Amino acid sequence: MRSNRKPNNGLGSPHGIRVREWLLAHIKQHNLGPGDRIPSERYLADALGISRLTVSRAINQLVDQGMLVRQSRSGTFVNRRAFERPKTRRNTVALIMPGRPGRDELGVQTPIGRIAQGASSVLVAQGYRMVVHYYHFLGDELDIVRELAGGEWDCAIIYPSFFQYNNVLYAQLNGQDPPVVLVDHYFPKLPLDRVVTDNFAGARDAVRALVARGHRRIACFSEYFGAVTSVIDRAAGYRAALEEAGIAYDEELVCGPQLMPGGTQSFLFAMEHMLRMPDPITAIFAINENVALMVQQAADKLGLLVPGDIELAGFFDAAVSDGVRAPSIRVVQAVTEIGQTAAGLLLDRIAGRAPAEPQHILIPARVMEQ
């Protein structure tokens, strides 16, 4: 007896499964998003060595499942439903940060800890749960970002590491699904929300204060130069303050630390060299508090008073108390506000209240003078 059942050449057949697997791999490999066109049926049939009829049936079933959408005379496109995630975890936000947001040696919460605290205060008030994920090495960060891109979490606030090629890593999160907000620094070419300090203005205002105190030979010391946007913006603010005061920018006064035996870093030789110049430096702008502390250590070894023999300005978020020598002009970031603002932006993005284009929010820093 002949069966009236038609051969299963659709999605459930081996050939149909091949079409599905090929298309899903193609979408992922080429980072296709909603509205992007997939290859033609003729191309797929030739590439996979199967009939166009089988390809057409497989695509029709993917259309029925909401993965693809056909447009008359235009082709077949990735459908938005292909990127929808289950909403069962929408009350959980991942906070991804380097190290652990604990306390420093004085028992004061670290800047990273205050970002976490600020974010948590907003999320908890809105009924959300925050799950903190720490990374200590590049491999950890890579795994966490891949899990986020793969749908392990629905949204996240991320403090990226300073690795030079992180833009490649975070390109996996290109777009707003899953919703992601970067804090501290960012990747200019990636369309991701970010909440960061106005580093340019903070640096410019600190160097302006040095100029107002009569300094003309001002060095700029940094741990990093290159792709870290917070450093780039601070270095640009340093240069802008000099130029607006009519002080020529001198590349000889901009440097990083020397690597010492044992892997430590030091500005001892840089300071010694600049103080022996025919027109020696009288002040230093430190990119961050680690640099400021290294400047203090170098000054101690050279028998210099800070301030007194040389003046120091710079970004310095650590709490000032007995035993802590802060710069006489310090830039203090509003790190708790950064966390609060990032959480608020993320909630707006989840609820569909945020504008479609990525949001770039600058939080002012305070310049405090002693």
Image (cartoon, rainbow, N blue to C red):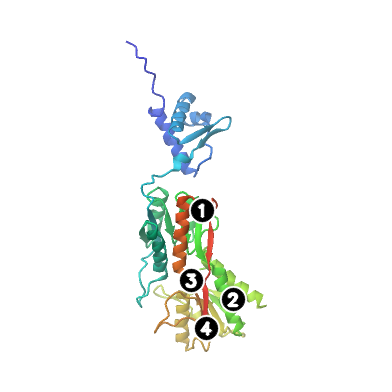
**Which amino acid type corresponds to the residue marked 1 in the rendered image?**
Ala
Q: Position of residue 304 (x, y in %)?
A: 49, 88
Contact between marks 3 and 1 (CB within 8 A): the answer is: no
Contact between marks 2 and 1 (CB within 8 A): the answer is: no
Mark 4 or mark 3: which is in front? Answer: 3
**Which amino acid type corresponds to the residue marked 4 in the rendered image?**
Glu
**Of pointers 4 and 3, the one earlier in the residue sequence:** 4
Q: Real-space Cα distance between discs 4 and 3?
A: 30 Å
- Circle number at residue 314: none
**Of pointers 3 and 2, the one earlier in the residue sequence:** 2
Residue 275 in view of the camera: yes
Mark 3 or mark 1: which is in front? Answer: 1
**Of pointers 2 and 1, the one earlier in the residue sequence:** 2
Residue 49 in view of the camera: no
Q: Real-space Cα distance between discs 4 and 1?
A: 52 Å
Q: Residue 109 falls in which quadrant of the image? A: bottom left
Mark 3 or mark 2: which is in front? Answer: 3
**Which amino acid type corresponds to the residue marked 3 in the rendered image?**
Gln
Q: Give the residue number, with chain letter if any, for mark 1.
A: 354
Q: Give the residue number, with chain letter if any, for mark 4.
A: 272
**Of pointers 3 and 1, the one earlier in the residue sequence:** 3
Q: Residues within 10 Å of mark 3 (few under 14, many from 20)?
A: many
At 43% from the left and 43% from the top, the residue drawn is: 84
Q: Give the residue number, with chain letter if any, for mark 3.
A: 333
Q: Give the residue number, with chain letter if any, for mark 2.
A: 252
Q: Quadrant of the N terminus?
A: top left
Q: Real-space Cα distance between discs 2 and 1?
A: 45 Å
